[in-house]
Amino acid sequence: MDEPAVVRIFDTTLRDGEQSPGATLNIDEKLEIARQLARLGVDVIEAGFPIASPGDFEAVRRVADEVGRGDDAPIIAGLARANQADIDRAWQAVKGARRPRIHTFLATSDIHLKYKLKISREECLARAAEMVAYARGLCEDVEFSPEDGGRSDPEFLYQVLEAAIKAGATTLNIPDTVGYTTPQEFGALIAGIREHVPGARDVILSAHCHNDLGLATANTLAAIANGARQVEVTVNGIGERAGNTSLEEVVMALYTRPTVYGLRTHIDTTQIARASRLVSAYTGIPVQPNKAIVGANAFAHEAGIHQDGVLKNPLTYEIMRPETIGITESKLVLGKHSGRHAFQTKLAELGYDLNPEDMNRVFERFKDLCDKKKVVSDPDIEAIINDEVYQPVELWRLEHVQVSCGTSMRPTATVTLRGPDGIVREDAAVGAGPVDSVYMAINRIVQAPNVLTEFSINAVTEGIDAVGEVTIRIEGTNGAHGRHYALNPQFGLRQRTYSGHGADTDIIVASAKAYMSALNKMLSARKEEVGG
C-alpha cells in the first residue's frame, strides 16, 4: 500500500490514449513520451497492449528496458485480457522493468457478458480468479479491472473483486468504460466496494473514467473522495471516443485544493506543459484553446475587468500560476541577431533538451524564420520543434513544392519528393485549389491510397507574418486511383487513422508537410506490420 495521503498517477497515454483516432505512435515516439512521463513523476506507465501487435509488444518491452530500469523509475504495466496467451505476452514485455506490472481485465456487466463474451456470471467469476492467480504466479504486482464496472451489478461486482483479491490482485481498478456514471454514482460505487468487499482496504483501489458525458474528471475526483488511491489518466485527456480523464486536471485539482482533498501526488507539476506539448506534437491532436490547465487560453485574460484585476494581483482571476505547470514568461526576445547560445538558453527555458542533430536542424529553421519575422516568439519556436523533431521517420521526403493559382488560373502544383530508395521524383497535378493540387501531385508519386478525413489550419501567433500550423488526418484504403484522399466511399474499406502535422509561414508548404507526415506514418505502420 502507498501512503494514505498520496494518490498514485497511472498514466495510460501510451495505451488507452493511443486509441484516439489518428494518434498512432511509432516505437521511438512512445519511448520519448515515456521518458517525459518519467520526468513528470507518474507512478505507473501503462506502455501498451503487448499482444495487440509485434510493434506494440516491442514498444512495451523497450519502455520497460529503457525507461523502467532506474532506481526511481515508474512501474511499467502491460495490458492483458483474462487469458493465458495475453498474460504471457504481457509478462514477456514488462519483465525487464525494475517494477513490472501485469494489468488484466474481464468484463463484468451483464450486457458485456451476454453480447460480447457470451459467458455466464459463474464463468466470469471463475475466469477472473483463475487468470489473476496465473498472472500473480508470474509477477508480484497484478492489477485487475472489471471492464464496464460502472454498469455492472454491484453485488456481482463485489463477488468478482473479492475473488480477484484472494487470487493475488494488488490493485483493483474500477472502469467507467463507457462514461455512463455520474459523480454521485461513481463515488458511491467506490465507497460500496471499500465497505462490502473483504480485503478491499488492503489493496489499492483505482478509478478509470471516460469522458462521454464530460464527467471523467468529476467522476475521478468523486472516486478519490471515496477512497480511491490510484487514478488512470492520460495527458491532455486523449483517448477513444470523447477521451479519458485528463492527467493535468486531476493533478492540479488536488494541488490547488489541498484543504478539500488533503491529498497529494508525486507529480512534478512544472513538467505538465512540456508533457502536453510533446503528446500533442507526436499524436497530431491539437489541444483545444479553452482546455483546462494546458489550453492556450487557460491563462489568457481579455475582459477589461479581468485584466485590471490580474495586473493588480494575479490571484483575483488566476487560481494557479502558469509557472506552476511549466509555462514561463519569455525573458529572451529572439531575432535575426540572436546566436546559438541564446537559442539554446531559450530551448532550456522552454523545457527542451535536443540532441546535436536535432538542434542543428531547429536552429537552421529558426534563422530562416528570422529572415521572415522581426521577432520570433516562444510559440513560433515550439512550432519549429514540433515540425522538425516530432515527425515520423521520413520514408518519403518533401524536397520542393511550387503552386500556381489565382482568380483566372487553374490551380497547378509541382512537387519533388525523395523516395526511400534515395531517388528524386517529380510530378505535377491540377486540382480544385492549391492544396488539392499539391496532394494530388504527391499521390501520383507515392501511390498510397487514402482518404482525407480532417484538415485544419491554425495561426501559431497573431499577425500577418504568423507561422501557420496544419493538422490533417487520413485513413488508408484498400485500393482505387486518382484523388485518393477525397472523401468517397468507392475507395474501399476504411482502415486505421493517421495524423500529420506541418508548420511554415507559407500555408501551402505547411499543408504539404502535414500530408507527408501522415503518409509517412501510414507507410511506416504498414512496414512494421509486415515485419519490414
Image (cartoon, grey):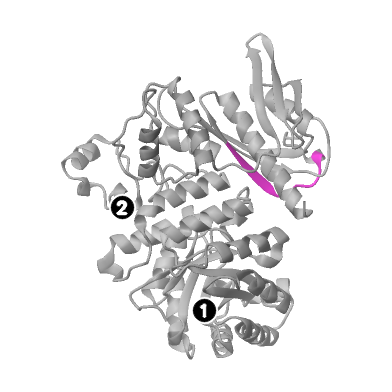
Q: Is residue 474 left or right of residue 377?
A: right
Can residue 9 be seen at all in this image of the molecule? Answer: yes
Q: Is residue 45 left or right of residue 79?
A: left
- Tag 2: amino acid: Thr
Q: Secondary structure at mark 2?
A: helix
- What residue did someone put label 1 on? 172
* Boundaries of the magenta span: 491-501
Identify the image quadrant of residue 395. top right
- In the rendered structure, which disc, 1 or 2, sits on the residue that comes first in sequence? 1
Identify the image quadrant of residue 352. top left
- What residue did someone put label 2 on? 324
Q: Is residue 57 above or below residue 513?
A: below
Q: Residue furthest top?
A: 408
Q: Is residue 33 above or below residue 392?
A: below
> Which is in the foreground here, disc 1 or disc 2?
2
User: In which quadrant is the N terminus drawn?
Assistant: bottom left
Can residue 285 be seen at all in this image of the molecule? Answer: no
Percent across and percent down for residue 463 are 41, 23
Percent across and percent down for residue 140 are 55, 82
Q: Is residue 531 left or right of residue 20?
A: right
In the image, is residue 25 part of the stretch drawn in magenta?
Answer: no
Please give the count of numbered marks on the rendered protein: 2
**Front one among 16 and 161:** 16
Q: Residue furthest right?
A: 480
Percent across and percent down for residue 180 are 53, 65
- Tag 1: amino acid: Leu
